[in-house]
Every structure is written in C-alpha cells, then in structure tokens.
Image: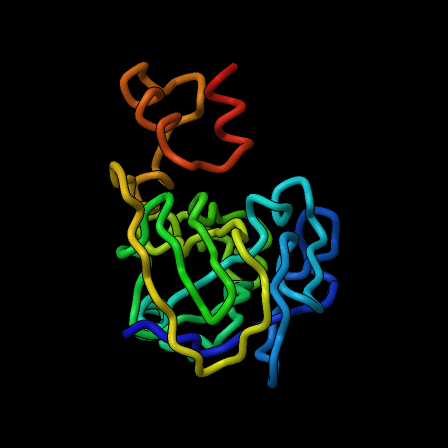
Amino acid sequence: MPFLAAICTGQAREVAAKSGLTGIDKQPVEGPVGIGPEGVAGDTIVDRANHGGAEQAVYAYCAPDAAFWAERLGRDIAPGTFGENLHLGGIESADFAVGDELWIGPVRLQVTSPRIPCATLAARMDDPGFVRAFHRAGRPGPYFRVLAGGTVAAGQAVRFVPFDGPRLPIAEMAGLPAPERIAPALRARLLSLPIHAKLRAALAA
C-alpha cells in the first residue's frame, strides 16, 4: 500500500543555472505540514514561470524510482534530491496517469503532468548530461493540483484513486512533441483529460 515516506521543503539557494537561484534543494521536515492550493507550507519556488502555481502545486517522487537512480549512479538518493515535496513509498512513476488522485488524510491531489527535467536538475546532480538521462529513464514523477487541502505528516497511508477515464501515463506524456506538432487524434485525447491548464491552452490555440 502506498505511504508518505517524507515531506520535503526548501529555501532559495544559489545554483549555476538559469537565474542563479533555485528551490530544488529540498529536505525532509518533521511533524504536520499544511498543503494548500499553491503547494506545501514553508516551501520556496523560485522559477514560477516553469514551476509551481495551482496546476503544479505539489511534486512527488517515488522511493522505487529513487532506488533505481541510487543503483545506477552509485550514490545515495535521499528524499528531496529531485526537488520533490512528497517522497512516496509503495508506488512508482509508472503507476501514474493524468487524472489519477492521491488521498492523504483530508488532502486530495490530482495528477496534471510529469516533471520535465531542466538545467537546474542537471546542476543539482552535478552532471550536464543528467537531463537526457532523466528523460530517457521514464521515471519523471507526477505534478499535482490540490483538490482539497489540509495537514499531512510523514508515515501516513496514501490512497491511490485511478482516473475514471482513458489513461495517459505520465511517462508517455513526458515524451509528447511540442503542442503545434501533436496530431489531431492525440490532441482530442489530451483535451478530454484533466491536463495541466498551460498545455490545455496551448492545444486549444
């Protein structure tokens, strides 16, 4: 059964990429933590043009995916390494599709999109080639919108509620071409799902 292994937050720190600041360096926190429409209490999001907001309020990564990277890289991958807010046990990226929900106590989260790796992640991992490696691994981790907020704590059970409709795995979504290159049939399929609002607007345009 899935469970909440850790809740992670971070403050702005210097990074050799983009604006020079990032909130990707997240660490586990103890005790109850609030989750609201804009994300996890106490967390900092620097690049709001590409991260955060109501449609990417919470990012999760999974313990089995972290174990994959630990074995591949020969190093410890602690909770928060990939900038995730929630580190989940008993489930992995391959299990998630757009529209799936996680229920953690009073909190309800809905998958909107996968994580798209960027230069900040490469800098975090001290590997210029990590963006390509992360993308090819097919273990992106999901972003969520918050359907119902509340307070959660590490160790809580997580209920996985599959989307009641067509499934689009987040690993497949991570490999989509640019919106203007998406074929009409796939465009219609995407628009029938509760996808990230930014992608919906691009497809509608």
Q: Nearer the viewer, residue 204 or 160?
A: 160
User: Residue at the location (71% across, 69% down)?
Assistant: 42
| Residue 187 % position (x, y) | 35, 21
User: Residue at the location (32% across, 72% down)?
Assistant: 2
User: Residue at the location (42% across, 63% down)?
Assistant: 103
Q: Nearer the viewer, residue 154 or 28?
A: 154
User: Residue at the location (31% across, 51% down)?
Assistant: 138
Q: Classify 180 as above or below 89.
A: above
Q: Classify 7 as above or below 117.
A: below
| Residue 123 % position (x, y) | 58, 58
Colour mapping used in the image: rainbow
| Residue 49 % position (x, y) | 67, 40
Compared across the picture, whether 138 is left or right of 4 comes to left
Compared across the picture, whether 103 is left or right of 68 comes to right
Q: Classify 28 as above or below 88.
A: below
Disc count in the image? Answer: 0
Q: Report if residue 125 is visible in the image.
A: no
Q: Report if residue 202 is visible in the image.
A: yes
Residue 64 picture quarter: bottom left
| Residue 156 % position (x, y) | 44, 79
Image quadrant holding the N terminus, namely bottom left
Compared across the picture, whether 89 is left or right of 36 comes to left
Residue 178 picture quarter: top left
